Amino acid sequence: MTRPLLFVTALLAVAVAGCDGGAGRASPQASASSALTDQQIAAVGLQYSQCLRQHGLPRFPDPQVTDGHLGIGRPPAGYNPKADLMAHPAAAAACRPILDRLPASVKRRQAPTAADLQKLRAYAKCVREHGVPEFPDPDQDGVFKIIGTRLEHEDPAIRLLPAEAACKQFWSGPIRVDGADKGVKK
């Protein structure tokens, strides 16, 4: 399996309910679950982002799509899209009909299994042992929360990517990061 590394951002629990970011290719999962290509999903996501910017959230980033799931793109440094959405409920409500055009399967990922969580914990332990001692364990949704750590703004090439390369035997799926302008996605 090719494991591209990619930066992801804070999850949108309010608007996009736990999605992560990615590239814009058609995927078998998207076709099976929604009959939409990644490009079609991204187009709806872009309309949503533009709507939010028109309704008072000028820094809200453009979307990204991975494996048929919509997520927000990389926000500007220091900007928290989730907090901005929560602070502007009228904007979120005004733009929600755009997202409602997408099937739920595009906006939500399944929760990880107990076995997946165990593998993610082993991955986190390995990353800590390979030079990133502040790397957290995943939460119950399989998300690594790095708000307030050095990793939130650090270039991942410095420590995180080498640690990821050393630990890839523990987890071959996506790595979801919440609360940062950077993260790793395999």
Image: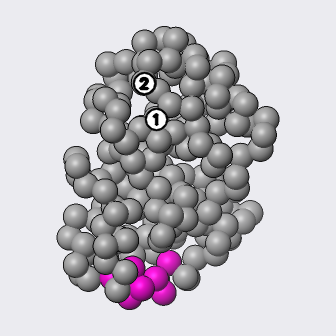
Query: Which mark, residue 82?
Result: none
Q: Where is mark 2, residue-wise? A: 134
Q: Please give left or right for residue 146 compared with residue 142 in the image.
A: left
Q: Please give left or right for residue 10 compared with residue 142 in the image.
A: left
Residue 185, percent across and down?
Answer: 50, 38
The quarter in which the N terminus is drawn is: top right
Q: Which residues are magenta?
A: 91-99
Residue 186, percent across and down?
Answer: 55, 34
Q: Residue at x 25, y 72 (%)?
A: 57
For the question of whether residue 43 can be seen, the reply is: no
Give the secondary structure at mark 2: loop
- Using the rendered view, name the quadrant where residue 154 is placed: top left
Question: In terms of sequence position, does the residue under pointer 2 or pointer 1 come before the other?
Answer: 2
176 over 15 or under it: above or below: above
Magenta stretch encompasses residue 12: no
Q: Where is mark 1, residue-wise? A: 184
Q: Please give left or right for residue 118 compared with residue 101 in the image.
A: right
**Mark 2 to mark 1: distance in Å?**
15 Å
Residue 153, percent across and down?
Answer: 27, 36
Q: Amino acid at mark 2?
A: Glu
